[in-house]
Amino acid sequence: KVHQEAKRFARDDYDILLIGHEGHEEVEGTAGEAPEHIQLVDGPASVENVAVRDESKVIWLSQTTLSVDETMATVDRLRERFPHLSDPPSDDICYATQNRQVAVKAMAPQCELVIVVGSKNSSNSVRLVEVALQNGADAAYLVDYAREIDASWLDGVSTVGVTSGASVPEVLVRGVVELLAEHGYDDVSTVNTAEETLTFALPRELRPARTARK
């Protein structure tokens, strides 16, 4: 979706300010769609380096796995410099990423410790650790598997929050919950802040094969 937006606004000769982290695969892929029109904006501090041709034709897009708060802080700073800055036609932050961040914001003030299940090279998982610490958790750690949990993290902790990156298999989250239960954290409650109902159709190329197998 973001790639299509980039191509569309490049055709309309906009300067496109892409909010994201330098070197991230998604940023490189999006920028490659219209390199002559796209400038990377890596956080509020880099806004001063942005130069545009026409301040009336500027739009921002973003990496889909960023922190919502981080993105909007950069957008606010950009809008101070470019009052006519246009917003993208739809929300670029991945719905699964955004929903998890909202849930962690609600959960973190009640937790002394938050454990995020996800890979260290997963941008949205790393953001969840940051969101937890920014919203009241005393400590937050990122783990790929339950076995990476250090028992010393649990010393003096009465409430542990557990969340996961957007693409983490449920079995890995269950493994963390089961390990915590072994350490006495067996009273589990769920924080619900959004109901995800979005479904994705199979690619057209796969539909006939699936029908034939029936």
Image (spheres, rainbow, N blue to C red):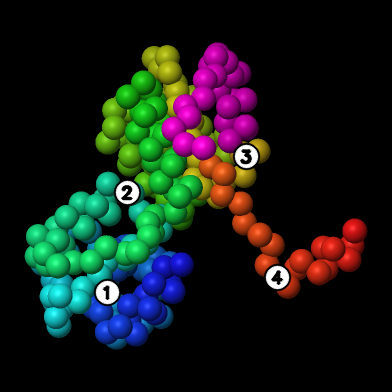
The alpha-carbon separation of the residues under discs 2 and 1 comes to 19 Å
Q: Earlier in the sequence, mark 4 or mark 2?
A: 2
Residue depth check, mark 4 versus mark 1: number of the one nearer the observer: 4
User: Is 103 located above or below residue 119 in the figure?
Assistant: above
Type of residue at label 2?
A: Val
User: Is 147 located above or below residue 64 in the figure?
Assistant: above
Residue 204's disc is 4
- Does residue 177 show up magenta in the picture? yes
Asked if labels 4 and 3 touch by Cβ distance under 8 angstroms, the answer is no
Residue 186 location (% of width, % of height): 57, 15
- Mark 2 residue element: helix
Q: Earlier in the sequence, mark 3 or mark 1?
A: 1
Quadrant including the C terminus: bottom right
Q: How many marks?
A: 4
Type of residue at label 1?
A: Ile
Span highlighted in magenta in the image:
173-195
The alpha-carbon separation of the residues under discs 3 and 1 comes to 37 Å
The alpha-carbon separation of the residues under discs 3 and 4 comes to 27 Å
Type of residue at label 3?
A: Glu
Residue 170's disc is 3
Residue at figure coordinates x 29%, y 28% from the top left: 136
The alpha-carbon separation of the residues under discs 4 and 2 comes to 33 Å
Residue 72 location (% of width, % of height): 24, 52
Q: Earlier in the sequence, mark 3 or mark 4?
A: 3
Q: State the residue position of label 2.
A: 68
Residue at figure coordinates x 38%, y 22% from the top left: 111
Residue 42 or 85: which is nearer the viewer? Answer: 85
